[in-house]
Image (spheres, rainbow, N blue to C red):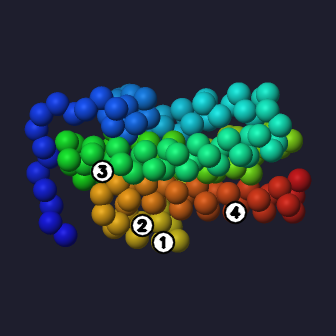
Amino acid sequence: MKQTQPQSGKFPLLPKLIATSLGVGFLPLAPGTWGAILAIILWLPLYIWASAEVTLIVTAVAVVALTIAGTWASSVSERYWGKDPVIACVDETVGQWISLLPVLPSCPWWEILLSLALFRFFDIFKPLGIRWMERLPRGYGMMADDILSGIYAVVILVIINTFIL
């Protein structure tokens, strides 16, 4: 695969805001964790005030919409910041929203923290084929590994909700 040099010039605002999850990617420590925490903060009003059905539908729609926008913005970010820049954390926001899909208002609040811990575990250590997903080109690879990390977190949370709670 041909490696290109980062492009110089002014990075357009819209893809920059999307790629950095509204700028949290610029925070100095652990931008991926901040991207996941932002996802929880944006999602909490659903958990607190919406029904289980509304929470699930809105979360799923947000995942699809931000996956599309995030793939585009991540591809743009690579042109300015190089391959898989750490400040582009929209992939963590999407992955965290995916991991929240089974955490409905009827679930205990600690599942929110467990979804974060599970998602970040899979995202950081990249077992079970997650690392392979990074090989996809441009924004697809940036997003795909976090999507799969979120899916693995969902599987564990569904098992917990089905057999333990």
Q: Nearer the viewer, residue 95 or 79?
A: 79
Q: Check disc 1 and give the amino acid type.
A: Gly
Q: Is the residue 28 above or below the residue 165 in the image?
A: above
Q: Check disc 2 and give the amino acid type.
A: Met
Q: Which mark is residue 129?
A: 1
Tag 1 secondary structure: loop
**From the viewer's perspective, is the residue at label 1 or at label 3 nearer?**
3
Q: CA distance from mark 1 to mark 3?
A: 22 Å
Tag 3 secondary structure: helix
Q: Residue at x 89, y 53 (%)?
A: 165
Give the mark, 1 or 4, whose residue is nearer the N terminus.
Answer: 1
Q: Check disc 4 and give the amino acid type.
A: Val
Q: Are marks 1 and 2 in contact (CB under 8 Å)?
A: yes
Q: CA distance from mark 4 to mark 2?
A: 18 Å
- The answer to whether residue 22 is seen in the rendering is yes
Q: Which mark is residue 155?
A: 4
Percent x, y of residue 25 = 38, 34
From the viewer's perspective, tell me whether residue 8 is left or right of residue 54.
left
Mark 4, Cα crowd under 10 Å, few <14 / some 14-19 / many 20+, is: few
Percent x, y of residue 124 = 47, 54
From the viewer's perspective, tell me whether residue 125 is left or right of residue 117.
left
Give the mark, 4 or 2, whose residue is nearer the N terminus.
Answer: 2
From the viewer's perspective, tell me whether residue 147 is left or right of residue 88.
right
Q: Residue at x 22, y 33 (%)?
A: 11
**From the viewer's perspective, is the residue at label 1 or at label 2 nearer?**
2
- The answer to whether residue 119 is seen in the rendering is no
Q: Check disc 3 and give the amino acid type.
A: Ser
Give the mark, 2 or 3, whose residue is nearer the N terminus.
Answer: 3
Q: Residue at x 38, y 59 (%)?
A: 140
Q: Are marks 2 and 3 in contact (CB under 8 Å)?
A: no
Q: Which mark is residue 75?
A: 3
**From the viewer's perspective, is the residue at label 4 or at label 3 nearer?**
3
